[in-house]
Amino acid sequence: MKKIASLLFAALVASSFGASVQAANYQFDTKGAHAFVQFRIKHLGYSWLYGRFDKFDGNFVYDEAKPEASSVQVTVDTTSLNSNHAERDKHLRGEDFLNVAKFPTATFKSTSFTPNGDGKATLKGDLTLHGVTKPITIDVEEIGGGKDPWGGYRQGFTGKTEFKLKDFGIDYDLGPASQTVEMILDVEGIRQ
């Protein structure tokens, strides 16, 4: 009887320790403006045009002990595109580019997260933009994580990807130097 009790106690202790290390859910800190979805594209091959989406939301699951089980979901309000130039923004939101009247949101849902060491990882998933869904790869770097001054816990990452506009049905001719857009995603999440 003592042996059985000892085995049950050991199993209970082991399961308690196992449960303490688990995946955590994080919500993007968009209220505090600690998350950004930005883009850049070459303008005629002479300079870079930068912009951002002012309205978006998302969440991620992250387990420091098992990062390969991580996942992320993002929803972007494409009507919130902002390149600091009202006329250009109107054109980019129009039918030649994002056609936000027909496609007011873009989404990303991860399919895999592969740690590469030194806080870097490869995130793969499906991007739906302009009504087209395609797989993309995002190069991710962990910025850091820890307690915040308000009693919460935060985790931050940055990611970069690029893709051809034509792959998502956007075929307005900006010239040969302006076929690929780069996306920069900076995310600080608050553990829920």
Image (cartoon, rainbow, N blue to C red):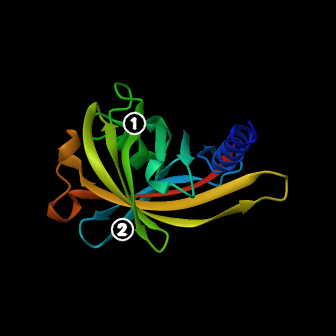
* Labels 2, 1: front one: 1
The reply to whether residue 182 is in sight is no
**Viewer-proximal residue, 88 or 182?**
182
Crowdedness near tag 2: few (<14), some (14–19) or many (≥20) residues, C-alpha within 10 Å: few
Label whose residue precedes the other's in the sequence (2 or 1): 2
Could you tell me the amino acid type at mark 2? Trp
56 lies above or below 14: above
- The residue lying at 40 percent from left, 39 percent from top is 109
Q: CA distance from mark 2 to mark 1?
A: 23 Å
Which quarter of the image is occupied by the N terminus?
A: top right
The secondary structure type at the circle numbered 2 is strand
The residue beneath circle 1 is: 106
Q: Position of residue 136 (x, y in %)?
A: 29, 49
80 lies above or below 103: below
Q: Position of residue 100 (x, y in %)?
A: 38, 31
**Image quarter of residue 44:** bottom left
- The residue lying at 84 percent from left, 52 percent from top is 151
Seen in the image, is 123 located left or right of residue 186?
Answer: left
Which quarter of the image is occupied by the C terminus?
A: top right
- The residue lying at 26 percent from left, 54 percent from top is 163
Could you tell me the amino acid type at mark 1? Ala
The residue beneath circle 2 is: 48
**Viewer-proximal residue, 71 or 52?**
71
Seen in the image, is 135 located left or right of residue 119?
Answer: left
**Viewer-proximal residue, 107 or 168?**
107
